[in-house]
Every structure is written in C-alpha cells, then in structure tokens.
C-alpha cells in the first residue's frame, strides 16, 4: 500500500489526540463525581460535555484509520461504542450510576493503555 503525504502527520498527531481524549474523559469523571458528591451544579457541564467527548472519540478513530494504525482505531471505536451504547443501556436497564461508572472507567482504561502504547519509550543508557 502506498503512503499518503498526510500519514506521517496523522501518526504524529495520534498521541496528542489520545492525550486530549484521556483528559476529556478525566474531566467528565471529575464533573460527575463533584456533581454527585457536593455540588449538583457540576452535573450540567458533565451532561453538556458528553456530545463533545463522543465526537472526540470519533475524530481519534478517524485519524487512526487514516494513519493506518489499527490498534488505536479499534480502541477508539471501542470507546465510541461504549459512549454511544451507554444512553440506551441506561434507559433500558435503569442502573444509572453503576453503569455510568463502569463505562467511564472502561473508556478511561482503554484511552490510557492506547496512549501508553503510543508514547515514545525512554532508552536506557549503556553501561
């Protein structure tokens, strides 16, 4: 397969996209936790951030596909599937908080593992 001129740029942008995705998931969890434990006003930003988070996961999946990085594409599609399936599952099952927490932790873990896999490794100094 031939490489497109954008492929190196897209590959270089993947760790940054994954870092932003991880930060967005972390902010989403922080807003929900703060809203449930002490300040209900934080639930508004939590809810309004959900479409942005879904779009960011979709963007990361698209960039990974264009960069021909299968592992990141599969991981981002898994995060996207979790986020898209969460609403209908909560409405049908009714386990709002526990299901919400499981989906958030799964998305966080997937994003963290993908980012860890794409960060450059430190080279050990020769003895």
Image (tube, rainbow, N blue to C red):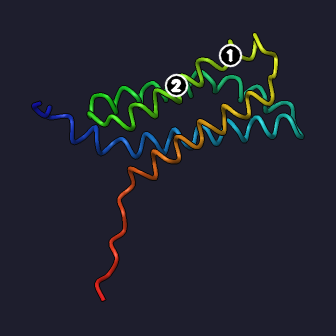
Q: Is residue 42 left or right of residue 112?
A: right
Give the quarter of the image for residue 92.
top right
Q: Is residue 59 left or right of residue 80?
A: left
CA neighbours of label 1 inside 10 A, class few (<14), some (14 to 19), many (20+): few
Residue farthest toward the bottom in the current orientation of the protein: 127
Tell me where residue 87 appears, x and y as whole percent: 68, 16
Tell me where residue 84 appears, x and y as whole percent: 58, 18
Residue farthest toward the left in the current orientation of the protein: 2
Name the residue located 66 percent from the left edge and 20 percent from the top edge.
86
Residue 110 position (above or below residue 77): below
Name the residue located 30 percent from the left edge and 45 percent from the top edge.
12
Tell me where residue 114 appears, x and y as whole percent: 45, 44
Q: Is residue 20 left or right of residue 34?
A: left
In depth, the one of 9 and 83 nearer the eye is 83
The CA span between labels 1 and 2 is 12 Å
Query: Please, what secondary structure does the residue beneath circle 2 have?
Result: helix
Tell me where residue 63 appears, x and y as whole percent: 34, 31
Give the quarter of the image for residue 34.
top right
Query: Please, what secondary structure does the residue beneath circle 1 have?
Result: helix
**Quadrant for the N terminus in the image:** top left
Which residue is label 1 attached to? 87
Q: Earlier in the sequence, mark 1 or mark 2?
A: 2
**Quadrant for the C terminus in the image:** bottom left
Residue 80: numbered disc: 2
């Amino acid at each position: 397969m031939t490489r497109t001129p954008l492929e190196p740029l897209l590959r270089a942008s993947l760790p940054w996209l994954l870092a932003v995705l991880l930060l967005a998931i972390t902010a989403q969890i922080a807003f929900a936790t703060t809203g449930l434990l002490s300040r209900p006003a934080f639930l508004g930003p939590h809810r309004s951030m959900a479409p942005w988070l879904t779009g960011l996961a979709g963007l990361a999946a698209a960039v990974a596909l264009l960069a021909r990085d299968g592992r990141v594409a599969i991981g981002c599609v898994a995060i996207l599937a979790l986020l898209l399936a969460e609403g209908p599952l909560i409405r049908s099952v009714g386990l709002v908080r526990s299901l919400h927490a499981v989906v958030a932790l799964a998305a966080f873990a997937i994003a963290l593992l993908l980012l860890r896999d794409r960060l450059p490794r430190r080279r050990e100094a020769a003895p």
